[in-house]
Image: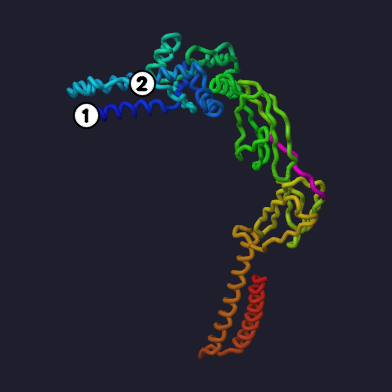
Amino acid sequence: MARRLALWALLLTTWIGVLGAEDWRVAIVSLTPKADLLLPIASESAGRFAPRLTATDERQAHYRERLGREADAAYDKARARLYAGGETDALRQLKREEMEGGQLPTLITYTPIPYEEALSTLLSSGGEVVEWYLRHEGLDGLITLSVEEVDVFDRVVCTVFEEEEMRMFDRLVERGSYHLLTDAFNEAMLFYGSAGRAAALLVEGGPPSLRILLDGEEQAMGERLFFTEGTEILLSLSAPYHHSLTTTVSLEAGRIVTVDGTLESEEGGPVTLTSRSGAVNWFVDGVFHGNTISLGLDHVRYPLSILVTKEGFAAQQIALSAGAGSEVMITMEGELTRSSPLLEREQEDFYKALRSTILLFGAYVATHAIGNTVGFESEFWPVAQMASGAVAIVNLVAFAAQLAAYGR
């Protein structure tokens, strides 16, 4: 009995601990059939701009209340199991310990729920009905989406419920043009997740190796979205072979500021590109610059992408960086590509020459054999032997020269 009581006490404690460790749970519900088209946009915006929860006194109080309800449910279930098993002594000793604190989750989990007529009717009642639904479903928050046709427009309403109802936005857009609401959803989700306290800084574009510093602190490579509760931030952008940029960015809580990460490329002196393989096709940063042996470039901006092609040869891609010098020599490997038309023609000529050589030597052997056959004596056969032999030898020499050319 004592062991069973200890087991239930451990189970109760573990259960409460696991429940308390879960994320902040929010449902995104479509209240109208057309609002289903908004669920992917809203979910993506929420996951990107509101992945983490900002703590407030109201949210902390709500979370403690939720933990209390879950602890009560776990306690009642333990009592029911002990009662059903007839463990009266264990039942008398089982106590519901008061919860202490409870760490507010830092991550938010979003669950999109498509339109259901019964659920839409229920949530449209608002007030205590929504509060009951949140408690019943074990949710901490609720985001509702509705679309109403107004003439040639769609009226889109986004509302958030936690302790109270808050309308995030109410917009008119041309019918079906929901992509125009992306920015509105982004800022609405940012405001919700941060409780209206944080701003977002988004750096778009620029070199892949862009280095970002915020107030002098270097950020992780590839990270482009940042959240801060400050009103100003010093932004520094830099990348190899580009001029760096430093600027002060003004921020506003609940708003997203987008900064173009494009940097001016470093400019070098003139560069001459020369091919050791004859005239080639030059492509500089994807632009064709002609078929020549040498190509001169003025006012070069690094890094520079050079593509060199020539019929029958493998293309060469060269990344030219600062410090490469004023003259760059390029040598084609001389390696024929298997799909090259030139290779196909060379192979065809080779097989024709081989076939002709074999046939001519066959003709020489045939005339010699026929001339030595009894009953076929004639002055014609010696002449034919001499002619076919000479032609075969000349053809063999030409074939040997062609074969030797493949080694050069």
- Seen in the picture, residue 8 relative to 243 is either above or below; the reply is above
**Does 289 lie within the magenta span?**
no
Q: Position of residue 6 (x, y in %)?
A: 26, 29
Tag 1 residue: 2
Q: Is residue 226 visible?
A: yes
Q: Main secondary structure of the magenta part?
A: loop
Q: Which residues are magenta?
A: 261-269
Tag 2 residue: 70
Q: Position of residue 357 (x, y in %)?
A: 60, 76
- Seen in the picture, residue 359 relative to 225 is either above or below; the reply is below
Element class at badge 2: helix
Lower position in the chain sequence, tag 2 or tag 1: 1
Element class at badge 1: helix
Q: Position of residue 93 (x, y in %)?
A: 24, 22
Q: Is residue 111 visible?
A: no
- Seen in the picture, residue 101 relative to 155 is either above or below; the reply is below
Marks 2 and 1: CB-CB under 8 Å?
no
Q: What type is the residue that disc 2 sits on?
A: Glu
What's the residue at 19%, 21% (across, down)?
Answer: 88
Mark 2 vs mark 1: in front: 1
The Cα atoms of the two marked residues, 2 and 1, are separated by: 25 Å
Q: What type is the residue that disc 1 sits on?
A: Ala
Asked whether, in this view, residue 240 is left or right of residue 95, the answer is right
